[in-house]
Image: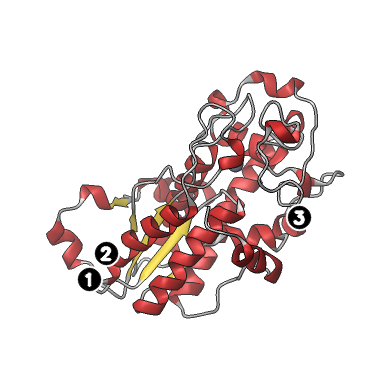
């Protein structure tokens, strides 16, 4: 039963906007088509994971979520936009491969992308990101606010509310250590990449020491990784990585996206960022 479902899911075609012509796009039902935009920066993820870890995860989660949605709600059409290697990560730019984009540019990029579709009457736009830096989210949430104020388009960003409302800790398999400190290329992401792309994980992860920092603490804001003593560009305990946890974690990224999409479509209230994160976003200058 499970196998059959997996097979039929993988045979479903994912509609990619770049492969359509304008007539095909014009034929899509405005009220029954949902667009997915994966967006995350290229950013150092320790000496053991690729700089595209967040970007790849955003794209894969959106793709898998579409496959699940095609089964759950086959009357709707799901369209994947090309993944944008865009995001704010200035704190990581003391490592090669980290490319930081200003938060105002992120806002304008998302707004321009979504409003190009909204102007033609399309109504649903999901933003998939796995990069949780607050200036990055400020760009995304400002764009969403602007779109919703000018058009009928409904948008959401599923992972931020899940992440910042500590839902991972609440739902994950019990492990006997505090995973909430595994914030960057640590246990969680190394497990996920070991599950999804074992050939992209450098074996050196097994020898990496545990190292913890609160990147959102006021005294750490504005500092780069190396100034915080993060000489290898990760935060957490990658050596603990476990492929079974990686499977759970990846599936969770998919489930969260599926649930948010259905809630958005059905007009239910989607999860919100907690107040303290909203306030932090508001207090932040554009950077
Ligand atoms: Zn990451």
Q: Which residue in the structure is indicated by mark 3?
A: 169
Which residue is located at x 54 percent, y 23 percent? 199
- Give the structural element (helix, strand or loop) at label 1: loop
Measured in 3D between alpha carbons, the distance from the residue under mark 1 to the one under mark 3, in whole angstroms, is 41 Å
Q: Does the numbered disc 2 mark a residue whose Cβ is under 8 Å from ligand 1?
A: no
Give the residue at mark 1: 120
Residue 196 drawn at (x, y percent) = 55, 36
Q: Residue furthest right?
A: 176
Q: Residue 153: percent from the left, percent from the top?
A: 36, 74
Earlier in the chain: of badge 1 and badge 3, it is 1
Mark 1 vs mark 3, foreground winner is 1
Residue 155 left/right relative to 193: left
Q: Is residue 171 above or below residue 147?
A: above
Which is more N-terminal, label 2 or label 3? 2
Q: Is residue 112 above or below residue 54?
A: below
Whether residue 119 is visible to the viewer of this picture, yes or no, is yes
Displayed-image quarter of ligand 1: top right
Q: Is residue 116 left or right of residue 110?
A: left
- Residue 151 screen position, x and y as percent: 34, 77
Q: Which mark is residue 116?
A: 2
Quarter of the figure with residue 160: bottom right
Q: Residue at x 63, y 65 (%)?
A: 283
């Amino acid at each position: 039963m499970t196998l059959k479902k997996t097979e039929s899911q993988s045979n479903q075609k994912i509609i990619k906007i770049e492969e359509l012509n304008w007539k095909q796009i014009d034929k899509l039902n405005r009220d029954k088509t949902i667009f997915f935009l994966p967006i995350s920066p290229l950013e150092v993820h320790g000496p053991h994971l690729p700089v595209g870890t967040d970007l790849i995860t955003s794209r894969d989660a959106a793709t898998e979520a579409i496959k699940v949605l095609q089964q759950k709600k086959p009357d709707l059409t799901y369209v994947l936009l090309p993944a944008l290697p865009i995001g704010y990560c200035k704190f990581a730019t003391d490592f090669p491969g980290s490319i930081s984009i200003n938060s105002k540019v992120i806002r304008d990029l998302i707004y321009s992308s979504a409003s190009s579709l909204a102007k033609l009457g399309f109504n649903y736009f999901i933003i998939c990101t796995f990069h949780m830096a607050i200036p990055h989210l400020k760009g995304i949430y400002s764009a969403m606010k602007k779109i919703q104020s000018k058009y009928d388009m409904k948008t959401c960003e599923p992972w931020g509310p899940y992440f910042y409302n500590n839902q991972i800790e609440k739902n994950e398999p019990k492990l006997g250590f505090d995973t909430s400190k595994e914030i960057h290329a640590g246990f969680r992401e190394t497990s996920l990449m070991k599950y999804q792309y074992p050939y992209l994980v450098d074996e050196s992860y097994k020898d990496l020491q545990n190292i913890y920092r609160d990147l959102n603490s006021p005294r750490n804001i504005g500092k780069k990784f190396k100034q915080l003593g993060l000489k290898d560009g990760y935060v957490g305990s990658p050596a603990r990585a476990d492929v079974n946890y990686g499977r759970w974690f990846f599936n969770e990224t998919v489930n969260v996206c599926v649930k948010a999409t259905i809630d958005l479509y059905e007009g239910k209230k989607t999860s919100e960022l907690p107040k303290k994160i909203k306030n932090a976003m508001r207090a932040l200058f554009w950077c």
